[in-house]
Image (spheres, rainbow, N blue to C red):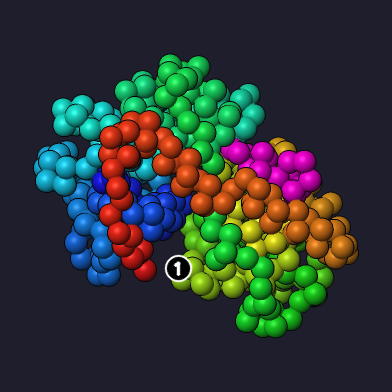
Amino acid sequence: MHVAWLGKKSPFCGNVTYGREVTNHLLDRGYQVSFLHFAQQEECDQKWRDCPEVFLPFLYKSQIYTIPSPKSSQVLMRSLQKFQPDLVHASLTLSPLDFRLPDICRELDLPLVATFHPPFDSKLRNLKSSTQYLTYQLYAPCLANYDRVIVFSEIQKEMLVKLGVPRDTVRIIPNGVDEQKYAPALSAYRHTFQAKRVFIYQGRIAPEKNVEALLKAWRLANMGEDCVLLMVGDGPLKASLELLYTEDQGVRWLGFVGDETQRIDLLRAADVFVLPSLVEGLSLSLLEAMACSLACIATDAGADGEVLNQGAGVVLDTQGVTGQLKTLLPLFREQPELVTILGHKARQRVLERYTLQNNISQLEQTYQELCPTAASAPHPAPVQSFP
């Protein structure tokens, strides 16, 4: 089966990781994949091997949304006509082109699948007053014209159904993580931090991630010289917060870490992962930390509460995060047995529900529903996955 994948390669965000991991595994299972994304050709010095690539012109793009150029629809249609895929899968980039896709694919008689990523707060009372809910309202009429829409949780599905997306169209396929790559092991970084207990946050340093609530709690809890909080990531709030919360307080700002091996090694060096977000989809950073056997603390934003419930971690309310963390952080500092037990349970939860192999198998079932003839054809020999 030939899948035309419309997604992102830059700037780095969860959508980029999702597209890379899923398309790598599709290639490993013998699928043909063509990758279409918004980029200037000079942005992609290193090609993704064995994967035809199309650069869609754009006027502006960020981690959150993209403004395509007027020619992007024409480039997309010509490319699909050239590739003649069996199916189009759009890992939606929040751009006006998302709304044109159903018409383009209908004209070319191509089944169309979407993965809908926008974050949300699991409490509908808060969600309905937020910009995230407006995104769901805006997209629902368009998503009703897709053949399948993939979301990460039952809450997302019910919300889209209430907004008019046919129930049979929506599939719940949670994010997955490669449990062999993300696994506990000794870290070269551990000795460099010289701390009894290492806490870590990985993600955007942005308002919706609520990182200042974590930093305030860290300072109020007076965690001491033998504890370190690693802040891994970049974003609009980093410069100002870095001035207020310093290494003297045990906070170390590591910035954006692009190398995946280095990010894994940082996770392995830590004991506790903290995610204080106000809104989420299903955090890949959380799943990666769980797979590395870190004890995890996260808010019930998005589907993250579902991931940690029933003992796989500690779930916080999105309201009053600073107060909750002020109490919990010293507990995790003083109770190594608790850290060990929760780290073990976190990895077991990933192995039970959130492996990437299971994610891909569910995705294959969705493809087979839409393209039974192509799915039943012999697969070509597997090709090498992306670097």
Q: Is residue 134 left or right of residue 44?
A: right
Q: Is residue 302 magenta?
A: yes
Q: Which residues are magenta?
A: 300-316
Query: What residue is at 44 percent from the left and 41 percent from the top?
Result: 363
Camera-side residue: 300 or 153? Answer: 153
Residue 260 x/y as whole percent: 49, 68
Circle 1 — which element?
A: loop
Residue tagged 1:
258
The answer to whether 209 is drawn above or below residue 288 in the figure is: above
Camera-side residue: 197 or 278? Answer: 197
The answer to whether 126 is drawn above or below residue 35 in the figure is: above
Q: Quadrant of residue 113?
A: top left
Looking at the image, how many numbered discs can be counted on the residues?
A: 1
The answer to whether 372 is drawn above or below residue 223 in the figure is: above
Residue 125 x/y as whole percent: 63, 24
Q: Is residue 69 left or right of residue 163?
A: left
Query: What residue is at 49 percent from the left and 35 percent from the top?
Result: 151
Q: Amino acid at mark 1?
A: Gly
- The quadrant of the picture occupied by the C terminus is bottom left
Q: Is residue 25 magenta?
A: no
Query: What residue is at 38 percent from the left and 54 percent from the top?
Result: 29
Camera-side residue: 197 or 92? Answer: 92
Q: Is residue 269 visible?
A: yes
Residue 156 x/y as whole percent: 53, 30
The answer to whether 187 is drawn above or below residue 26 in the figure is: below
Crowd around label 1: few <14 · some 14–19 · many ≥20 (10 Å)? few
